Image (cartoon, rainbow, N blue to C red):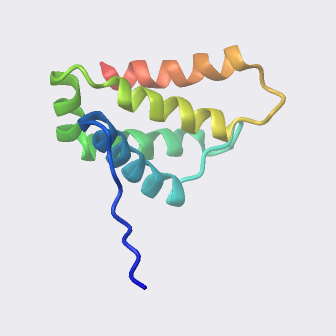
Amino acid sequence: LFRSSIAIFSSKEDVLARYTRSITERFTRTHSFTYGQQNFEDYMLDLFTHLYEHREFGRILLDNHLLYIVEDVFDENFLNASPSDRNLYQQMFIAGGFFSVYRM
């Protein structure tokens, strides 16, 4: 029996979101983020280096008014890294701050 791993997408945005998640997952596998970690500056440098390496893709999203896809992935990753005792407002504020720096 042959099984195909071909994904079916309902829109172009779904394809772009899947690609954004895949490059983000590759990054997060090698760079773990935890709130309050000692090497926070190193993590941020690695994060923005990663974003810089994918700047052409980001520019395409920006030019087509689809940068919200990156923002959604930022939110997901920062919320997933957050300890359960942090309040939601604080988590979203931090994720939004990092995204705003990237968007600039």
Residue lying farthest to the right in this orientation: 85
Above or below, 82 relative to 7: above
Residue at x 33% of width, y 63% of height = 6
The quadrant of the image that shows the C terminus is top left
Please name whichever residue, 11 or 25, is drawn nearer the observer in this view of the structure.
Answer: 11
Q: Would you say 64 lies left or right of 86 here?
A: left
Residue at x 38% of width, y 38% of height = 48
Residue at x 36% of width, y 71% of height = 4
Q: Quadrant of residue 37?
A: top right
> Residue 40: x and y, percent?
59, 40
> Residue 47: x and y, percent?
43, 42
Q: Would you say 34 lies left or right of 15 here?
A: right
Please name whichever residue, 61 or 101, is drawn nearer the observer in this view of the structure.
Answer: 61
Q: Would you say 99 lies left or right of 82 here?
A: left
Residue at x 33% of width, y 51% of height = 8
Above or below, 86 relative to 43: above
Mark count: 0
Above or below, 14 relative to 93: below
Residue lying farthest to the bottom in this orientation: 1
> Residue 34: x and y, percent?
67, 42
> Residue 43: x and y, percent?
52, 44
The quadrant of the image that shows the N terminus is bottom left
Please name whichever residue, 76 or 35, is drawn nearer the observer in this view of the structure.
Answer: 76
